[in-house]
Each structure stands twice: as structure tokens, then as C-alpha cells.
Amino acid sequence: TRELQLLHFGLFLSIYLAALLGNGLILTAIACNHHLHTPMYFLLLNLALVDLGSISTTVPKAMANSLWDTRAISYAGCATQVFFFILFVAAEFYLLIIMAYDRYVAICKPLHYGTIMDSRTCVYMAAAAWGSTFLYAVLHTANTFSLPFCQGNVLDQFFCEIPQILKLSCSDAYLREVRLLV
């Protein structure tokens, strides 16, 4: 019903605005306060960027679908959404691993923390995380959208997701995904 669609739009809009506000405040605080230019806050800044990107990948399209009473997404739009969703989710995992390493060094080797986790090391680790997740997202997206689709083009979700896309394929997509993961 139209009322539920508008309620859906309102709920998603409030969640989206709260995420934008919260992450925007984190980015502003870290960028403006010179005392927060440490490895931990640099990684938090990256994590806030990842959060902004991941929520901006799916939520605006879901809100537009609710507002305009549609469920359509173009092929290129679906591929773009899959690419960015994988990019930001994988980047979040890598950044959390780097943050865990940062805390490990701070707790277990406090006297060596300044030499192990200097600003150059943090930048290199963040660049490696972003670069490897970019490559990972390109490989997954290219692998998924190179499959032949023979079971229509309708997904049963409000955003494009690899398992739902693989269900539309008429090839043995499982083996291709395992090869890509390996």
C-alpha cells in the first residue's frame, strides 16, 4: 500500500540522515582537531568513510523505489551497486583488522608503538586495504556479470546482491565463485 511505502521511505530517510550526520561529525572532528591526528583516529576516519559509502550504496535506491512506487534498476546500476557494496564491505573488514593490529601494538608493545605504527605505516596499510578491496570488488563484479542470464532479470530484493544474481544464471556459477575466492 502507498502508506506503507511512505513509511518505509520515512524510516530509511531517518536512518540515512542519522548515518550521514554521525559519520560527518566524526570526519569533521578528526579533520579539524590536530590532537586527533594519530593512527587510531586516522583509521576511524577511514572507517567513517566506509560507513558513509556502504550506506549510500543501497539506501538511496531503496528510498527512491519506495517514493516512486517502482522496483526497477538498470543492468549498469545493478553492476555499480554490486561493485560498491563489495568494495565498502571488504574495506570495512580490512580496516577493522588494521585497527585490531593497532590496538594490539598499543597494548602489547607500548614502548615500540611510535616506531611500529607511525603515520607512514598507517597510510600504507590503509592504501593497501583500499587497493586490495578495489581489486577484489572488480574481480567479483566482473565474474558475476560475465555469467549468462537465462531465468529473467527480476531480483526478489530491493538491492542487487551476488547470491540473488547467481540464481538468475543458467551456468554453474558456484564453481566460478569458488575459483574466484581461491
Image (cartoon, rainbow, N blue to C red):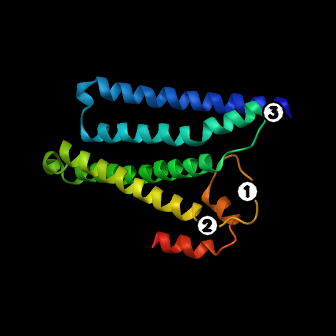
The extreme top residue here reads 32
Comparing 148 with 51, the one in front is 148
- In the figure, is residue 5 to the left or right of 99? right
Q: Residue at x 61, y 67 (%)?
A: 147
Say which element carries label 1. Answer: loop
Q: CA distance from mark 1 to mark 3?
A: 26 Å
The amino acid type found where label 1 is placed reads Asn
Question: Image check: 3 left or right of 25?
Answer: right
- Labelled disc at residue 177: none
Q: First in sequence, mark 2 or 3: give its number.
A: 3
Residue type for callout 2: Leu
- Residue holding disc 2: 147
Q: Residues within 10 Å of mark 3 (few under 14, many from 20)?
A: few
Residue type, mark 3 in image: Leu
Dot 2 or dot 1: first in sequence order is 2
Secondary structure found at label 2: loop
The residue at which mark 1 appears reads as: 153
Front residue of 101/90: it is 90
The image shows residue 174 at horizontal and vertical percentages of 60, 73
Q: Quadrant of residue 64?
A: top right
Residue occupying image coordinates x 53% and y 32%:
19
Determine which residue is flagged by label 3. 4
Do callouts 1 and 3 mark residues in contact (Cβ within 8 Å)?
Answer: no
In three-dimensional space, the C-alpha distance between marks 2 and 3, rounded to whole angstroms, equals 36 Å
Residue 140 location (% of width, % of height): 51, 61
Q: Where is the N terminus found, in terms of image quarters? A: top right
Q: Give the foreground label among 2 and 3.
A: 2
